Amino acid sequence: MSLLIIAALLYLGLALGFILVVDNLVGLVFRDPRAPVQLVSVYIGRAFAASQKLYRK
């Protein structure tokens, strides 16, 4: 029974990973020309700044 649960979780993880990869590839090909291009580091910086603000309060 536990083997079945492990197999199901691995299958879900692989399926979600595959969906994310395909989504990112489609996003690279069909970019929205109106949206500004931002790097992942911008999002990390914003998240870090927000966490610092919340920590100081």
Image (tube, rainbow, N blue to C red):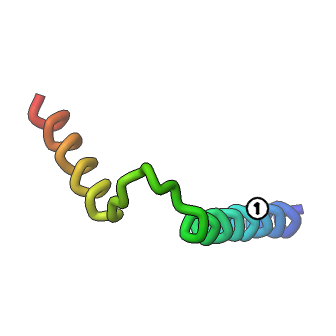
Left/right placement of residue 43 relative to residue 19 reads left
Q: Please state the total of marks drawn on the protein image.
A: 1
* Residue at 64%, 66% in the rendered image: 26
Residue 22 quadrant: bottom right
Q: How crowded is mark 1: few (under 14 residues within 10 Å), some or many (20 or more)?
A: few
* Residue at 84%, 69% in the rendered image: 3
- The picture places residue 57, in percent across and down from the top left corner, at 12, 28
- Quadrant holding the N terminus: bottom right
- The picture places residue 20, in percent across and down from the top left corner, at 63, 64
- The picture places residue 28, in percent across and down from the top left corner, at 54, 69
Residue type (three-letter) at the residue carrying disc 1:
Leu
- The picture places residue 8, in percent across and down from the top left corner, at 82, 63
Of residues 16 and 32, which is closer to you in this image?
32
Residue 54 quadrant: top left
**Residue pushed farthest top?**
57
Left/right placement of residue 56 relative to residue 2 reads left
**SS state under label 1:** helix
* Residue at 72%, 70% in the rendered image: 14
Q: Mark 1 points at which residue?
A: 12
**Residue pushed farthest left?**
56
Question: Where 41 falls versus 54 (above or below)?
Answer: below
Of residues 11 and 46, which is closer to you in this image?
46
Of residues 18 and 12, which is closer to you in this image?
18
* Residue at 22%, 40% in the rendered image: 50
Question: Where 50 falls versus 41 (above or below)?
Answer: above
